[in-house]
Amino acid sequence: MVLMVSNPASGTGVYTVRMPSRIPALLAEFLEVMLFVIQPLTNTNVYSNPNDVKDQAREHLAHAAHLREIFDPVLIYQELRHGVFDPSGLFQHIGETLKHHCAPMRDRAVEDLVRFAQQPGVEAVKAFRTCLELLELMKLVCDCLGYSSLYPLTIMRTGYRQPPTYPAPSLAPAQYWHL
């Protein structure tokens, strides 16, 4: 929001008041969502091989550390303000990381994301939007997997189960009509 105020008495005083940019907060949140999606699961299956889980956790932590190294919200915002930000390299690394963590059916969307980032101008914004959509889908999958693993435990510990709202259907009207 830009507000311009002039002083009618002097006629020369023009003041501009600007709201602070929300881009740094958006970039920081973007990084946190990426890190949330690729972090190792805390609830592992009892039947999993503990060595496999440890290797996977180490790999996930390495990916998270790599993302923190290449994605600096303050630097990206500064480059955006000066008009020198080139998203192609950054989104190339993000795409490789996402391909490693998302379902194979999303590989084409990740490739589109990298392709959008290599194009100049407004097309690069499509890369950011596509990445946010992918992260949203991946976050939903993480949430669903968490809920599905907790569901049996919830049912087991719940003492009261809600009775069905509707009575069982009766076939009497259909039998009467058929006769």
Image (cartoon, rainbow, N blue to C red):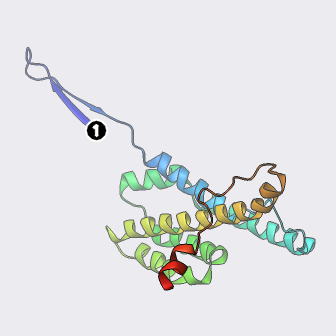
Comparing 154 with 124, the one in front is 154
Residue drawn where x is 65% and y is 64% of the image: 144
Residue drawn where x is 66% and y is 73% of the image: 101
Comparing 51 with 122, the one in front is 51
* 3 to the left or right of 149: left
> Where is residue 76 shown, x and y percent of the image?
48, 55
Q: How many marks?
A: 1
> Identity of the amino acid at label 1?
Met
Question: Is residue 47 positioned above or below 14 on the image?
Answer: below
* 154 to the left or right of 140: right
Q: Residues within 10 Å of mark 1 (few under 14, many from 20)?
A: few
Q: Secondary structure at mark 1?
A: loop
- Residue highlighted by disc 1: 1
> Where is residue 163 shown, x and y percent of the image?
69, 55
Q: Is residue 69 visible?
A: no
* 12 to the left or right of 81: left
Residue drawn where x is 92% and y is 70% of the image: 50
Q: Which image quarter: residue 135?
A: bottom right
Name of the residue lying farthest toward the top: 9
> Where is residue 23 shown, x and y percent of the image?
43, 49
* 2 to the left or right of 173: left
Residue drawn where x is 51% and y is 74% of the image: 173
Quadrant location of the N terminus in the rendered image: top left
Comparing 147 with 9, the one in front is 147
Q: Which image quarter: residue 9?
A: top left
Q: Is residue 173 visible?
A: yes
> Where is residue 54 shown, x and y percent of the image?
87, 68
Question: Is residue 21 positioned above or below 33 on the image?
Answer: above
